[in-house]
Image (cartoon, rainbow, N blue to C red):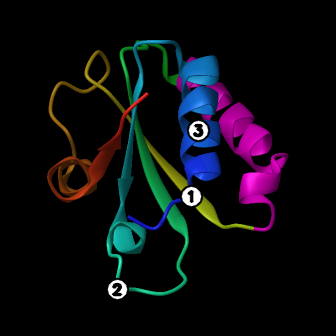
Amino acid sequence: MRLTHAQHLALVRAVHRHFGPHSRAWLFGSRTDDRARGGDFDVMVVSEEPDAAVLVDAKLALLADLHATAAFEDERIDVLLWSRRLDPEPSAIQRVALEQGLELPA
């Protein structure tokens, strides 16, 4: 996994700060391949939040928070959201993130 310790900590802490302590973060895409080079950070946040507007606000706050840290300065970050309370079944891309991605432990 191509994620520094500082990035890991910043990401997990920011996800918990904006989505709550029970939210989970998954890294998926090219950053999970140690042999790859470059690429953006593809992150999926799994939350139990039932309000779509709250999720969108939290996503924007998360991105602003991450881009304000030295660990993610000038990095491209894509955030995907999934809440079972809004949609019990993950979409195709959410399923890929869950099956092929790596959950980031707190």
Tell me the residue at 39%/53% (across/down): 27
Calculate the distance from the C-alpha at mark 2 to the C-alpha at mark 1: 15 Å
Chain-order first, disc 2 or disc 1: 1
Q: Is residue 21 left or right of residue 24?
A: right
Calculate the distance from the C-alpha at mark 3 to the C-alpha at mark 1: 9 Å
Q: Main secondary structure of the magenta part?
A: helix
Tell me the residue at 34%/66% (across/down): 32
Label placed on residue 35? 2
Specify few, some or many for label 3: CA neighbours under 10 Å numbering under 14, 14-19, or 20 or more: some
Q: Amino acid at mark 3?
A: Leu
Q: Is residue 81 left or right of residue 10?
A: left
* 53 vs 9: above or below: above
Residues under numbered marks 2 and 1 in contact, where contact means CB atoms less than 8 Å apart:
no
Q: Which residue is mark 3?
A: 9
* 81 vs 7: above or below: above
Range drawn in magenta: 53-74
Position of the C terminus, as image quadrant, is top left
Label placed on residue 4? 1
Specify few, some or many for label 1: CA neighbours under 10 Å numbering under 14, 14-19, or 20 or more: few
Q: Amino acid at mark 2?
A: Arg
